Image: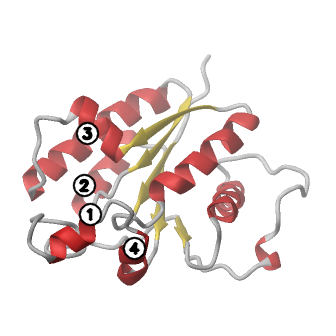
Amino acid sequence: MVPRGFCLWLTGLPSAGKTTVSHELAPRLRARGWTVELLDGDEVRRGLSADLGFDRAAREQHARRVTFVAKLLARNGVVPIVALISPYASSRAAARKEVGNFVEVYIRTPLEVCEQRDVKGLYRKARAGEIHEFTGVDDPYEAPTDAEIIVDTTRMSPGESADYVLLELERLGWLESLPSTLPTRSSRAVTHK
């Protein structure tokens, strides 16, 4: 029998660090024996949701499509790591209910830091009115109130953030604890729920 996987759903503002942290997490989970699939919001949009725009209805439909894929993967023993802005609490709640084995990871990065990190210049374009309905500028981001894991990327590097997520997954019972090869929570300042 294939063990049931679980979904790691990384949410946060554009340029918060979701994709970067997910790329650090994937090899760490594979090293523990899990089959992992990255579902990056931008990549999935090009493949599954190219027909959608960026208004609220389209964003919710995009999240539903990602949720469906994540559910299929998780029920077949895979750990889908979803890196998706998913700005609306209702979409994340629907994903949690649909997938079942679901861990929400809030990549909590302040808006001003996200704007500084924005290598694509999307915030600048949104502030100039060249892009409309941009999350964090003229479209809301509803921050999670019940995320199992909160990562503050202003205090941890991407690698430290991934290690922290693994420690929290152990604490929550999603992963077996390994011998003390990873840094402990007390070895650095972290912010979590």
Q: Give the quarter of the figure containing the C terminus.
A: bottom right
| Disc 4 residue crowd, few under 14, some 14–19, many 20+, Cα 10 Å | some
Quickly name the residue at label 1.
87
Q: Distance between the residues labelled 4 and 1?
A: 15 Å
Question: Disc 2 residue type?
Answer: Ser
Q: Distance between the residues labelled 2 and 4?
A: 22 Å
- Look at discs 2 and 4 and give the one toward the viewer: 4
Q: Which of the two residues, 148 or 154, is positioned nearer the viewer here?
A: 154
- First in residue order: circle 3 vs circle 4: 3
Image point 53% across, 40% down: which residue?
6
For the residues labelled 1 and 2, say whether their Cβ atoms are less than 8 Å apart.
yes
Q: Distance between the residues labelled 3 and 1?
A: 15 Å
Marker disc for residue 114: 4
Question: Disc 4 residue type?
Answer: Cys
| Disc 2 residue crowd, few under 14, some 14–19, many 20+, Cα 10 Å | some
Q: Distance between the residues labelled 3 and 2?
A: 16 Å
Question: Disc 3 residue type?
Answer: Arg
For the residues labelled 3 and 4, say whether their Cβ atoms are less than 8 Å apart.
no
- Look at discs 3 and 4 and give the one toward the viewer: 4
Q: Give coordinates of residue 128: x percent, y percent.
A: 13, 75
Q: What element carries label 4?
A: helix
| Disc 3 residue crowd, few under 14, some 14–19, many 20+, Cα 10 Å | many
Rendering quarter of residue 86? bottom left
Image point 8% across, 56% down: which residue?
55
* Above or below: residue 27 compared with residue 58: above
Q: What element carries label 3?
A: helix
* Above or below: residue 26 compared with residue 144: above
Quickly name the residue at label 3.
45
Quickly name the residue at label 2.
91
